[in-house]
Amino acid sequence: MATGVVALAACGGSSKGGKGTKVAGIGDSDGIQIPRVDPKLCDTKGKKISTYDLNHDNQPDVWKLFATADEGGTRVEILTCKQVDLDFDGKKDYVQTFSRTGEMLAEEFDFTFEGSMDAREHYDKDTGKIYLIERDSDHDKNPDVWEKYDKEGRIESVRRDRNGDGKPDLWEQYKDGELLAILYDDDFDNKVDRKDELTSAEPPKEEAPADGPADENAEGAEEAPEDAPPAEE
């Protein structure tokens, strides 16, 4: 059941029906009330917003954002983002974002319903397959696990941030979905201190880290793998 439709422009917006809440930075100059879409989760500029009340409490629970395009002289609406409040507490728990040609680019999930996203899945717009998952395992609103997938959808690598500094310090390497090696940066200096190589016949071997920091100039020391996750599309 639709409760409101809003057209947002760079200079403000207008509201038709429904119950809304003013979003900071959008429509402030004229005090217009608009549905509670979250502009931090996807771009709201110039979008038309349709809201839906799933539990019939006169509060929107689903927000769909549309861009307007001209196709052969016909104006069409293209879904660019969908925000959902699954437990009806006023906070977004699930978000989808789409390309201007309709392909889904990403999904975000708040598994704990605490008000911040716990995972973001990135999709290849040509194949529709996941190529990256970012996870916030400690719920500090920053990703600390990055899972990369190959074109066949098999796990390719996993990077983990164990000390919460925003940089990976453990790397899992896979081939054809099978774990081959785990690399560790035990003193968090962005250099590999030890490496476990695995085969399908033997489990991972945990070696105790050295008593002191690894010598950066020691023979055989290697730089840590690339630590920045792929850029979002």
Image (spheres, rainbow, N blue to C red):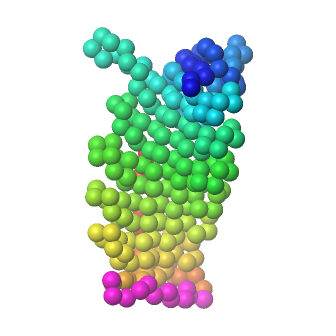
Rendering quarter of residue 225: bottom left
Task: Give the residue at the far top of this rendering.
Answer: 73
For residue 89, above or below residue 198 = above
Residue nearest the observer in this picture, 83 or 210: 83
Quarter of the image with the C terminus in it: top left
Residue beneath the point at 42% across and 36% down: 98
Residue 223 visible in the snapshot: no
For residue 138, above or below residue 200 = above
Residue beneath the point at 64% across and 34% down: 55
Residue nearest the observer in this picture, 86 or 224: 86
Residue 58 at what x, y percent from top left? Answer: 68, 27
Rendering quarter of residue 35: top right
Quarter of the image with the N terminus in it: top right
Position of 204 compared to 37: left or right?
A: left
Residue beneath the point at 66% across and 40% down: 88
Residue numbers of the magenta segment: 200-211
Residue 23 forms part of the magenta stretch: no
Residue 159 visible in the snapshot: yes
For residue 217, above or below residue 143 = below
Secondary structure, magenta segment, majority class: loop
